Every structure is written in C-alpha cells, then in structure tokens.
Amino acid sequence: MFSKVLIANRGEIALRVLRACRELGIRTVVVYSAADADSAPVRLADEAVRIGPAPARRSYLNAAAIVEAARQTGAQAVHPGYGFLSEDADFAEICAENGLTFIGPPPHVMAALADKSTARALMRRAGLPLPAGSVRTLPTLAEASRVAEEVGYPVIVKAAAGGGGRGMRVVRTPAELARAYARTRADAQAVFGDDRVYVERYLTDARHVEVQVLCDAHGHGVHLGTRDCSVQRRHQKLVEEAPAPALSPATLDAIAETALHGVLEVGFTGVGTVEFLVDDAERFHFLEINSRIQVEHPVTEMVTGIDLVHEQLHVAAGVPLRLRQSDVRLRGVAVEARVNAEDPERDFAPSPGRLDRFTPPGGPFTRVDTHGYAGYLVGPHYDSLLAKVAVWAPDRELALDRLERALDEFDVAGPGVRTTIPFVRRVLDDAAFRKGRYSTAIVERLLAGHGPLRPQAVPAPAGPGPAPAPPVVAAASPTADPS
Ligand code: MV4
C-alpha cells in the first residue's frame, strides 16, 4: 500500500478521500488554491501545498503544479476525486511519466471511455444494448440527417468529447437538425477542442439508472448494484438513490451484470459507473461510462457496506479484490440529497456568500459529507456543492421520511445564500416520486407545476453575527419549504 497520497481536489470529496487514507494509515497531501487556504481539507491533511490562485485552470487543473507538489512531498500516488482532472487521460499519463500512480484506470482505457463515441462502439462490440444511432461520428450534416431519418425523431446530437450532459442537443423535428448539428459542433470545438458529434434516438421519459462497478488490476470485478439519478436539473443531479426503485429484480440484475461485463471487456480497473437509460418496458440502453468516483457514491456504500475509496486505493496499489460477487449483498435503501448553494427560485443560479450558520443534521442512519462550517465562505470559483445528506433505511418509505427529517434539521444560512434544500423537499413530497415512478422529466414537471418555494423573500441580515434564534428546531432552516 502507498505510504503517502496526494489529493488533487477540494471540498467534500477531498475530505472523503483524506479520511479513507487516514483509516488505511496513508499520509495525506492536499493541494489547494488561494481561495481554499482556510478550507477543512487543508486543516485536516498531514501536509498542504498551495498550487495557484483561485481560478481552477491555474490550480486544480494545473497538472504541472500538482505533479511538482507530489515531487516536493514525496507522494507516491494521486487521487483525483471527481471533476477537475479526474477523467483526464493526459493527466494520468503525466502522472505515470513522473513515477506517480494515478488512482484510476490505465490512461488508454480512460481515453477510450472519455470519447463517448468510442465508448459506444466498444460497448456495442461487447454486446451491450444501445440507443439506436450512429456508431461513428458524423462529419457532415448529410450523414447526420441520414442517421436521424433512419432512427426516427426525436434525436439527440452528442459531442464525442462531451459526457455528463455537456455538449448535447435534443432535436424534435427534421427542420431543427441543421441548426442543432452546427451548434453542437461549434460548442464542442470551443469547449473541448474537438468538434466530432454523433446522433442517437432520443429516449423521452426514461429513467437514468447507473451501475457501480469495481475492478482490480488482475481482471476481476464485481458490480455493486444500481442507483437511480433521474432527478437532475441541467444535468446536475439533485437526489440519488440505491437501488433504482420500481424495477423488477430481474431487470436490476441484468443491468448490473451487463455493465460489469462491458467494463471487464475493455480492461477497466478501479471504481467506475456505467450509465443507462431504462424505458417503461424496462428495456435498458447504454449511455456512457464514468471512470471516477462519483458524487453519489455514498448511497452505494450505504446499501453494500463497502468503502469505495478504500477499494480504489487497494486496487491502485495492485491488491487483488478480496470480494466476490456473492459477497456483495444489497441491503435496504439509501437516498441522498445534494445541498448546493444555489437559488432554485432563480433558475438554480449560484448563490455565494458567507455561511454564518452551519449545523448539518445528525441522527440514526444519517451520513453527511460536507466541508462546510459556520463562517465558511462559499466562493464563486467552483461548483456550489456544500453537502450531501444521505440516509439509509430498511425500506424506501422510511428512507424518504428520514431524509425529510434530516433536511429539515439542516441549519444553513448566510446573507444572500440560498440552497437547493427547498426544491429537494418538494421532490421528496411528490406523489410520483414517493411511488418510485419518476423519470428524467420530474424536475421540469415540478418547476412548472408549483408556486414559489418561499412565501416571501427572507431579508438578509444586515451584517455578520448570528440570525435570530428560531422558535423551534424544525424551523431552524430559514430556506426550508414551508409547504
Ligand atoms: C440521452 C437521453 C435520452 N436519449 N440520450 C444526459 C447525461 C448523459 N450522461 C446522457 N444524458 C442523456 N442522454 C438519449 N439517446 C437522456 C439523457 C438524460 C437527460 C436528458 C434531459 C434531461 C435530463 C436528463 C437526465 C439524465 C439523462
């Protein structure tokens, strides 16, 4: 096992990785930007190295500075967390060239999966069912049009270099194709420096189901069941649960086994996520593979009892998996809500500011992953995830009640700071969601069909210092949905 690992990330995931390292007796180095000098990971790490100013491009995306920090501190491996450089095959390659173990799959596997068109071709060859569409990228509008006519409208134009919802456009009619095709290519060129696109049939009202896989460097792997991540707003997930609800056990097994087969075929190692869309008839269609630890990994940990970051560290160190598929038992239901500093009333716009109150919930079977604290400054530079509140229960009903209870306890407030808590509460109260009968359409439906989340704006306190004490604990979250 490694004796020192560098954590190339920030926020709650940097803390999560740091804790896993500490439990395994591994010393930790965190790198940080000027904006994160006062952060919890910097305080808790054995060593911290400042690598640049606030903008991510010059800090958390600065490969040379990160490698230099590893050299200075003698770290043997780099954990990239999620986002930033976590799926950057070039960074993984640079790590290898500098004698560092990148904690993730081999760079050539990362590169193949990062190209969504290549991933699609590889999974097709492995026998996975895909949405109808093109196998190759489509360099002309004429070819895109031919594929679209073949599979039938609506279609979706996707950038090969995209993924996670970035670089894609839905096209409802043939008349819209030319414009969507041109725009997707232009955007992809601008954002990724790669304008290759492909076309798929667009599956409406499907569920977004993903499979957690774990593979060692010796050709062995297990799947750790499914998660439903259909509750998304502009491809940002708001609520995630494990296992995916309202699907037959046979379907869940088939999806999970198919996913594991797919990743083993391409030499995947480490933890990964295979994304599918599942339609009303419970047919599933492969979308893409993520080669990193995901934000929503806690719900899988809660239903399996397996520490995914421990597993990542073991696999990266070359340790063979001790776990067999028959050892993986899914127990109960786990549900997670993301608490972002965003204003659901203003189109989920970032809502930065200082948190003068921050007391996360506790209680039975309740896990909070957060880097927040009273006095924490939510800056404008990075994504606005403040906390993940995850709960476990033997059944889904109780899990949802427990999550509501936990969110209602969360005391988070600061002048001008709004959170996603009121919107998540609305999701948890929705009748279709409660039955497990929801799809990727749920967020639009809830945004369209409701009045305001707050009866009136809560005036921001004039200056620093605590807000007036609320009369009862249940009202302690000033942003809680009053409905
Ligand atoms: C799709 C799709 C429907 N049909 N592809 C979005 C995230 C990325 N991993 C793939 N995504 C999708 N790809 C086809 N052929 C639906 C999604 C999708 C989605 C689309 C609109 C609004 C919310 C969504 C949530 C999850 C997935």
Image (cartoon, helix red, strand yellow):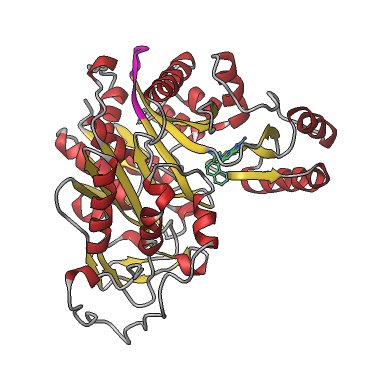
Q: Quadrant of the C terminus?
A: bottom left
Instruction: Look at the picture and state if 466 lies above or below 293.
Output: below
Residue 101 placement: quadrant: top left
Residue 415 placement: quadrant: bottom left
Report if residue 374 is visible in the image.
no
Q: Which residues are magenta?
A: 216-225
Q: Residue at x 49, y 23 (%)?
A: 109
Residue 324 placement: quadrant: top left
Name the side, left or right, on which 229 lies relative to 127: left
> What is the x, y in percent for residue 242?
33, 36
Instruction: Look at the picture and state if 438 lies above or below 371.
Output: above
Front-most of residues 269 and 422: 422
Q: Residue at x 62, y 43 (%)?
A: 192
Q: Residue at x 40, y 42 (%)?
A: 436
Q: Residue at x 33, y 59 (%)?
A: 36
Front-most of residues 77 and 460: 460
> Where ligand 1 lies, by quadrant?
top right
> What is the x, y in percent for residue 279?
54, 33
